[in-house]
Image (cartoon, rainbow, N blue to C red):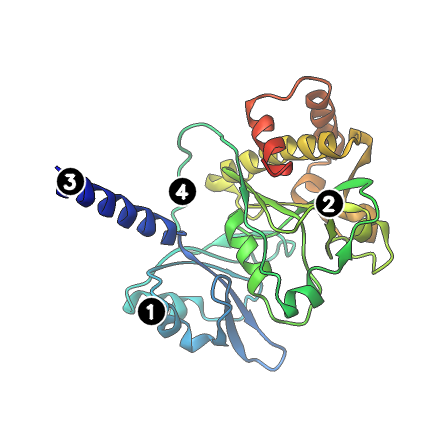
Amino acid sequence: MRKMILMLVVSTLFLAAVAAKESGPAAVAVSRGKNGEESFFIFGTGATGKLSDLPSELRKSGCREADLSAWSSEIDYGKLLAALERKGIRVTRCYVPDPGRASWFRKNLAGPEPEARGKRSLSFVRALIEENEYNRRYKLPGKFETVKYVTIHNTAEPFSARQERDRVDSRRDNMSVSFHFAVDEREAVQILPLDIHGWHAGDGAQGPGNTQSIGVEICRSQCRGAADWQYRRSEENAEILACALLRHFGLTAEQLRMHRDWSGKYCPHRILEENRFESFRARVAERLSEKPDREEREILRGLSGR
């Protein structure tokens, strides 16, 4: 009997360890510099290099699936996808610029897009970036004196909240970029402590967008067409998260802001495309006027550290 119990415990621990390692496809940013040099950056590992070395790098790190995102139309994507396939790496997304359209319109060359399943859901995940010397310099600038606003962004990428978190944690390009939450169709992932301000609003070291507001990135904003359901669910989850943040800090829906309000950047682009920010604000205000539902209560518990 004891042997059976021991085997059951070992099996349970093994399955838990395997589940902990499962993080979905590797997220990869692909770029082409002004000098024509083509390169990659893998979010989770922070690995960078020549684009021709990407298949080998993914194999070396144990990745068998990858999501790719690029802003250049000059790369030979057919050649890249073929090279990845030869290495046994399945590409689930390959988002590239859509010729003749604005830069925030991109298309998926890999396909097909994932089908909508089940209902929208939302859970809270605290996955703070590592507090190391680099992150303290470029991503964790200092304590909030006060929180007066919640600022809404779109990532302009197809990636999940956890993938966006990994990008922030592993990037080493000497750029000051960070935000507090990434939210997708399933999760609200906390990236920065709530008492530390970030670099997300583009209004400098003294600007109220950076120094007085919580930054919320709505993920999947490049998901359109057959994948549009992922963005719509992500935005609905962002309404719940925004409401919980306003409630947590004792703010009102009038203190919601867009990235554009601080620096003029066309962000959140999906909301701006359809001129929907005031309707977004109205839905948050309606939620705020009512008692928190089950999903918001979970977010509030997470914000309180319970």
How far apart, in angstroms, are the residues tagged by discs 1 and 2?
37 Å
Query: What mark, if any, has residue 59 been given in the picture?
Result: 1
**Image quadrant in which the C terminus is located:** top right
How far apart, in angstroms, are the residues tagged by discs 1 and 4?
24 Å
Query: What mark, if any, has residue 2 been given in the picture?
Result: 3
Q: Nearer the viewer, mark 1 or mark 2?
A: 2
Residue 175 in view: yes
How far apart, in angstroms, are the residues tagged by discs 1 and 3?
41 Å
- Residue bearing mark 2: 214
Of residues 150 and 202, which is closer to you in this image? 150
Sequence-wise, which precedes: disc 4 or disc 2?
4
Query: What mark, if any, has residue 114 been given in the picture?
Result: 4
Residue 264 in view: no
Q: Label 2's element?
A: strand
Query: What mark, if any, has residue 195 been given in the picture?
Result: none
Q: Label 1's element?
A: helix
Sequence-wise, which precedes: disc 1 or disc 2?
1
Sequence-wise, which precedes: disc 1 or disc 4?
1
How far apart, in angstroms, are the residues tagged by discs 4 and 3?
45 Å
Sequence-wise, which precedes: disc 2 or disc 3?
3
Q: Nearer the viewer, mark 4 or mark 3?
A: 3
Q: Nearer the viewer, mark 4 or mark 2?
A: 2
Across and down, in percent, residue 278 comes to 76, 31
At label 1, the amino acid type is: Arg
